[in-house]
Amino acid sequence: MGVFILTGMPGAGKEELVSVAKGLGFEIRRMGDVVRAEALKHNISPQDQGVGKFAHKEREIHGYDIWAKRIVPLVGDGDTIIDGCRGMFEVKIFRDAFGELVKIIAVHSAPSTRYPRLVNRGRSDAPKDLKEFEERDQRELGWGLGETIALADIILVNEVDIDSFKNEVVKLLKEIKR
């Protein structure tokens, strides 16, 4: 069993890594899924803009590591990718729970690569312009994401086409799968 914390800036390629990992039999636990499920218990629709506010309020009430604490019991005995980790305060929860089984995988891409990816994937949270993209980056970095990326055990640089990146991911995940 290995617990692999996936981190990286928006548009770096985390979703592609998760897709490949699923195909290789990794369990996937998304912190966002836990947030949405908990929001639903409080009558907040998963599609509601209020989910982000709810997540932030829960952090203020219960501590910034609350979402990590809530995902720990959901980790099974198989190799698991935990997606959505923002800061080392969350990594600490996972290391306290799983010890040396925890490794951080960071996916990195330059802002000049990530911005068009985010715009072109057409999701509702896509930045409207470069200013909004930069503001989102600063918000993510303010949560400690930069430190988590900097302290990663494994860094995958994604400045290649999608097929080449997926091939790199397959190679890496086959190496680390226990």
Image (cartoon, helix red, strand yellow):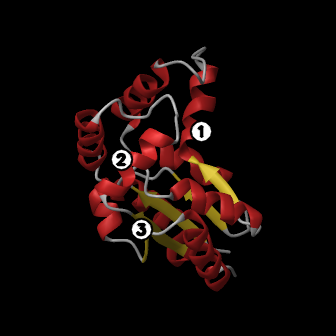
Q: Residue at x 28, y 58 (%)?
A: 146
**Which quarter of the picture shows residue 169?**
bottom right
According to the picture, the residue beneath numbered tag 2 turns out to be 115
Give the percent coordinates (x, y) of residue 36: 58, 30
Q: How far is mark 1 from mark 3, CA to CA? A: 30 Å
Whichever of callouts 1 and 3 sits on the residue coming sooner in the sequence is: 1
Q: Is residue 115 left or right of residue 83?
A: left
Residue type indicated by callout 2: Tyr
- For numbered disc 2, what is the local secondary structure? helix
Whichever of callouts 1 and 2 sits on the residue coming sooner in the sequence is: 1
Q: Nearer the viewer, residue 40 or 150?
A: 150
Q: Residue furthest top?
A: 43
Closest to the camera, between mark 1 and mark 2, is 2
- For numbered disc 3, what is the local secondary structure? loop
Closest to the camera, between mark 1 and mark 3, is 3
According to the picture, the residue beneath numbered tag 3 turns out to be 159
Give the percent coordinates (x, y) of residue 125: 45, 31
Quarter of the figure with the C terminus: bottom right
Residue type indicated by callout 1: Val
Confirm whether residue 53 shows in the render. yes
Give the percent coordinates (x, y) of residue 173: 63, 76
Question: Crowdedness of circle 1 by 10 Å Cα count: few (<14), some, many (20+)?
Answer: some
Residues at marks 1 and 3 touching, judged by CB atoms closer than 8 Å: no
According to the picture, the residue beneath numbered tag 1 turns out to be 34
